[in-house]
Amino acid sequence: MNNVVAQVALSNDCLSCTLRRGADFCNLPQHSLDLFDGLGHLSVFPADVELLVEGQSPRGVFVLCSGRAKLSMVSRDGKILILKVASNRQILGLSPIVSGRPSPVTATTLEPCQVKFISQDDFRSMLHKDSTVALACAVALSREVRTAFQDVHDLLLARSSTDFTHEEMAQMIGSSRETVTRLLGEMKRRELIRQEGSTLVIPNRIALQAIAA
């Protein structure tokens, strides 16, 4: 556990946190940051922990101070689809807490993550008390909507295939792991792609586009 804590630089509070960057709740005015800092608690989660579960009402919001988490949902035919990989102090569970509706996605940690959790009641109370925090919340929700298409674009055109397993790539496109493995193997045999360390190289993009068409 000590090694995990060292990797994510766990801080005792938001005021002294070395991970603070240009996120909405990292750059609040001092009086608002003091209020935000006094709520919830910081924790370190290992990989494969579900912070949110699709269809269930979240207990509160999770600020992803460090690390990454995948956001997924189950399709009508029972397949798991990965919608996005969250990071960079993103707030998970914000939309369902504000709207009072169940979470539309499942959020699962991909690696050790430092997370600040604030309960539903405390978070809503903070929004009523401080208009600056409420505005930051509105900005965060607006950004979620604005970047939805960009998130899909980034996932479909991810530069490195090693960021995801074959199973996870299959979940992104609504296919099966076996199909992804077979197609990647076939493209390698036809020299349409090749692996160079952690990088997937496309030597003939026009030929690959012709196959896709």
Image: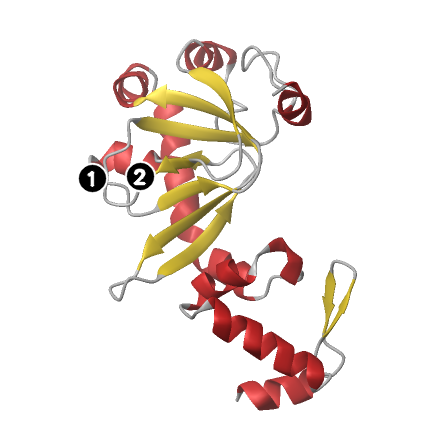
Between 119 and 130, which is closer to the camera in this rendering?
119
Asked if the residue at tag 1 contacts the one at tag 2, i.e. Cβ–Cβ closer than 8 Å, the answer is: yes
- Which structural element holds mark 2? helix
- Which structural element holds mark 1? loop
For badge 2, the amino acid type reads Ser
- Name the residue at 47% across, 61% down: 152
Q: Can you say which quadrant of the picture contains the N terminus?
A: top right
Residue 192 in view, yes or no: no
Q: What x and y, as percent, mark residue 154?
A: 55, 59
Q: Which residue is mark 2?
A: 95
Q: Is residue 108 above or below residue 113?
A: below
- Position of residue 143 in the picture relative to residue 59 (left or right): right
Q: What x and y, as percent, mark residue 197?
A: 79, 60
Q: What x and y, as percent, mark residue 194?
A: 74, 74
Q: Is residue 184 above or below residue 119?
A: below
Residue 128 in view, yes or no: yes
For badge 1, the amino acid type reads Arg
- Position of residue 65 in the picture relative to residue 119 (left or right): right
Tell me the quarter of the picture where residue 206 sits. Answer: bottom right
Tell me the quarter of the picture where residue 208 sits. Answer: bottom right
Mark 2 neighbour density, 10 Å: few (under 14) some (14–19) many (20 or more):
some
Q: Residue furthest right?
A: 196
- Name the residue at 36% across, 28% down: 61
Q: What x and y, as percent, mark residue 81?
A: 39, 59
- Name the residue at 53% across, 33% down: 89
Tell me the quarter of the picture where residue 13 sits. Answer: top right
N-terminal-most mark, 2 or 1: 2
Label 2, label 1: how far apart the Cα atoms are: 8 Å
- Position of residue 200 in the picture relative to residue 16 (left or right): right
Q: Which residue is mark 1?
A: 101
Coloured how? secondary structure
